[in-house]
Amino acid sequence: MSLNEVFGQQQVVQLLKRGLRTGRIAHAYCFAGPRGVGKTRTAQQLAKALNCLNGKEDACDECIHCQRIDHGNDPGVMKVSPDGQTIKIDQVRAIQRAFSYSPPENATRVIMIEHADAMTVQAANSLLKFLEEPTSRMVAILITENLHALLPTIRSRCQLLRFPALSPERIAQYLKEEGYDPETSRIAAHLAAGLDDARGRMEEDEFALLCERVIKWSGEIASGSSEALVSVQTQILETGRERLETVLDLLLLWLRDLLNDRLGREEQPVFARWSESRRRQSSRWTIDRLTDGMHAIIDARRQLAGPVQAQAVLERMVLVMQGGAVNAVSRRSPF
Amino acid sequence: MSYRALYRVWRPQTFSDLIGQEHVTQTLKNALSEGHFSHAYLFSGPRGTGKTSAAKIMAKAVNCLRGPAPEPCNDCEACSKITDASLMDVVEIDAASNRGVDEIRDLRDKVKYAPTEVRYKVYIVDEVHMLTAEAFNALLKTLEEPPEHVIFILATTEPHKLPSTIISRCQRFSFRRIAKNHMLARLHVICDAQGIEADDSALAAVVQAADGGMRDALSLLDQVLAFSKDRIDESAVLAVTGSVSRQVLGDLLESVVKRDAATALDRIGELLEEGLEAERLVQDLIHLCRDLLVMLAAPELEEVKNRMSMDERWTRLSEAGSVESFHSVLDTLIRTQQQMKWAAHPRILLEMAVVQLCQGDPSSASSEEVSSGEQPDLLRLKKRVQQLEERLAKWSGAAAPASAPSPQVSPPSPQERPSPPSAEPAPSPSLDRFLRQASAECLQRVRQQWPEVLSRVKEQKITVHAWLINGEPVAATENSVLVAFKNSIHRETTEKEANKSIIQQVMSRIFGSSQQLVTVMSSDWDRYKASSEISATTDDAFESRSESEEKADPVQRAVDWFGEEMIEVTD
Amino acid sequence: MKFRISRSALVEAVSQVSKAVSQKTTVPILTGVKASVDEDGLWLTGSNSDLTIQVCVPVKKDDKEQVKVETIGSVVLPGRIFSDIVRKLPGKSVDWVVDEQWKTILRSEQAQFELKGLDPEEYPRLPQLREDRMFSLPADLLKSMIRQTGFAVSTSEARGVLTGVLWQISSGKLTFVATDSHRLSRRQADVEAPEDLSVENVVVPGKSLSELGKILADQTGWVDVVLSENQVMVRADNLLFFSRLLDGTYPDTNRVIPNSGKTEVLLNTKELLQSVDRAALISRDGQDNVIKWTMKGEDTVQVHSASQDVGSVLEEVGAQVNGEEMSISFNAQFMLEALRAVDSDEIQIHFTGTMTPFVIQPADREDALHLIVPIRTR
């Protein structure tokens, strides 16, 4: 693989290649963007391009340097990731120790820190000097999904490269070209973080069936019937705790379709196949209640991340959604 | 050697290079020229404001072979060795990496050794907030009785994490975020020296994004250089920061002000498609709204004046709202921004926020504005009451139906004027008669708002809602709605006087004019529909709503956007 | 790749290179040992990327055939298991065959091991060394230079470059300097070097040097030292030792060393060492391990140390004192380490003031010195 083959990050790749060509590669980068958009992959290719025997602005992917880096056998290219939950100060010290030696001739050492936001405060602070005053040719690449969680003092020492999420349209298009069902691809693409994740979802059993189930549930919620609560137990929890996030994400996307419908937007719905259900369900919601309902879903999804009883969370969510404005803040246009 | 970052090349080497910190540098220079300085300094302030640089300059100034002088010569052996960190008597300690009590005890022992090459041993303890509690205690002992030949300079971005016992033993200097004009001037100097051509607007955008940190600004400039061909313009800076130009943001905000959620969402969709992040967009929107708010609240403020006065659209945009309204927009946006930090769907959160900002009917918006405004403007209130009174008078003169809604919650729409409600008193008009006045626009409006009607009815009386939900509005005139039921029990119960009056009240309130409820059995309706040519005005016309929406009454649209009290209709 | 090798020679070589192999490395290939066979014999390489040891088992040693090469080639084998296998093989010789997929068969008498090898191309390449940056000296001299300076390196990684020993060469003179910025040791020696060879800033990690000292323990002949941008190589009989260099500019220490003294003292090394050792019994309990010397009259150095909790010690050591009477306090540990590094019977100490560094030198030679920074006492 090379920089050119990184999927869907043309802008970042162009920028880096330009830097390689003109010799303006910074000594510290922060690659920020959602999961699955190619951050680590790009960092790896940059490390290769910087050390490649043949290419100047990209990796040839054939020379021994490129191969060594790919196999993790180049001592000058280090990768650090969280040891358990966090990246600890000793890990950072180890990097600094390794970098206190002078580099091999013509080599550019690269240190990649994955999940850089998982550095403990101590670890992050101890990286500051190192990032600011590198003693020799090196490039540090801090990789993060959560830019906000990085210390501002760290961020201000790096050149920030943002890796935008791959647009669902592009992912869907790609999946379609790979021969997946276009309508279901569209849903998976909206749901997923990146291409690989979307493909993984398409491979999951009964993905389409799950969509069907969620839409039916949404109908029950919209009609205000207590059937919706029964379904929590009989239909939803049954899908398995690990799929509940997906269920809620699907529900959220579905409500977004309803919202678009109510607003009279032309945008192609995510759930293209269910136009009849959409028409029927959307007439039962007001825009306010839809946004309140969506907030309820987002809240529930966050709660599920913690050690809670899933059933209670979902039931409460259904009640909030059915109770309309009772639990939600009144949100009105100020204009 | 690889490329050297601009912020390293342009690190200040004298106090006069340290821009925007004159309150610090002047005091230090005075102390230096008089020759009495403290043995412990604390430099605190945000990132990229020059703390460590100042510490190094200080170390040079006290040890300069041509000194002591207010500024180091940067030429003698001592100065140049300090600059390239090879002088052993000037020790830079990274407290973040050496934070334990052992390291500080070691330091405490080592300060007793005399300097070997220069007059003073200078210990620069950077990131001092990272020391452990025990380490602080150990440091305290040293600061209590520092040897004559030692100067401590503690630097930190987070002085609040320091024990007060440490702070009280240091002479403290607070570095400030670098003011925008200072930073801009410095950037110009650097660009000139580096032979970089840069547009003013581009540098202004860099300064804006740097948020008072010089290192941030130079980092960003570096990045833009890597990105641009020969000349730096604003779009290059925006591309690097991932920001949106203010013009595009203005378009988006205008849609919101017009309460045109669909267009606003389309705009967001386009921006995100271009690779912009939802988080960034929210942040930029917050910045813009903040500026608009300031324009309204403190129009004479220089900073905003400079930024906003170039374009009169900002004046227009700001005047479309009020201090309260922008306040509330900011509330919503900031809440959204916070939620985005942990939620998995930033885009949907952004869309929801925008929809909410476009939502709600004008009357309730204005009433909320009154209740939420901290200091309601009395004059405006008076004016509103006056308007309401006028309308009330008009109403009472127009022989309102028995179920006349209370005027303060249902200001009539200007739309009703061409056909006042009194002209349609018929309690149960035949379908024919009803349909002569039915229009596609009316039906569409009713359908649009029907969920609202249902939910308000539910708030009033939940049982009525249970019956009404089974009905479907199939036709409407300016002041009546035809609802079709499949089941006769549903229809009959809905028709009960008490229930009907609740529904009519709600409809009147929502549609802004007196409304009659007319019911019909679905089967009858279908038969009727089949036998007459009414499709143009009823059901099927619903499909072409987007087109008809375009042609909706401009007055009504204005009212929708701006709220009743902002529009004055003159015939 | 196919050859037969004497097992005892192989065991010896493997144990040498294994010293450099670490199981803790993050680079998978470095957990292995690289083996290459060519016309000269078998070369084994072990490395932890900071230091690398390469050992050759030559085809013939003292006219005895050790390696019989059929086809040349190389392979990387997993380090720990390979060295265990070699040690436990039963026979006197080992047959070694490697196929294209680096599958390796080691056969000795009735035992046959099949090991999965790795691509030797992935093994880090050793630096190209230019022989014009080379000098030679006896192994014993190199060992004593290491011993006389290595102890003074800094253990704090805050200033990385001070954890190494500075090597300088000019006009055929090699200088080692080590300092932790509170004491300094310097040793010089004439070596065989090209007249124009000049080296100013080669900093060899202290850790590597102590390894080198161990590896050279049995070497008696001359060694060659070759310098590259980022590595130093020491070549002895059938052995190559590589160490990465430390990055950064070593501080200029010449200014620190005073040229003349106000007070000069001549002492017997052994007596002094014992006296400081005794005084340290008290001082080591205190915070800074401080002892105080007072130069009295023309023939006495008074050694004193006191600790609040323990008590005190007072002792007089005979000496030749020239110059002003004075007192000075310093860290006893520094003095002990410096004195232990001195091989001469008598030492000379030059003082320039109570607050300025003083210099300890063997009385009979100019090429070694130790400097200690005094401590200010209240």
Image (cartoon, helix red, strand yellow):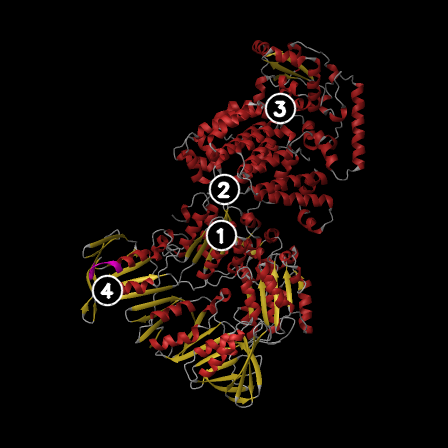
Within 10 Å of disc 1 (Cα), the crowding (few <14, some 14-19, many 20+) is many
- Which chain's residue wears label 1? A
Asked whether residue B13 appears in the rendered view, the answer is no
Q: Position of residue B60 (x, y in %)?
A: 59, 71
Q: Position of residue B535 (x, y in %)?
A: 58, 15
Gap in angstroms between the C-alphas marked 3 and 1: 52 Å
Disc number for residue C8:
4
Which type of secondary structure does the marked residue at label 4 adopt? helix
Residue underneath mark 1: A87
Write down the region rendered in magenta: C86-94
Disc number for residue B52:
none
Examine the rendered structure and indicate whether residue A282 appears above or below residue A103: above
**In front of the other: A144 or A301:** A301
Gap in angstroms between the C-alphas marked 3 and 2: 35 Å
Which of the two discs, 1 and 2, labels the residue nearer the N terminus?
1
**Disc nearest the viewer among 3 and 1:** 1
| Among the 4 quarters of the image, the one containing residue B495 | top right
Residue underneath mark 3: B451
Amino acid at circle 4: Ser
Amino acid at circle 1: Ile
Gap in angstroms between the C-alphas marked 2 and 4: 61 Å
Which type of secondary structure does the marked residue at label 2 adopt? loop
Q: Are marks 3 and 2 in contact (CB under 8 Å)?
A: no
Residue underneath mark 2: A165
Which type of secondary structure does the marked residue at label 1 adopt? loop
- Which chain's residue wears label 3? B
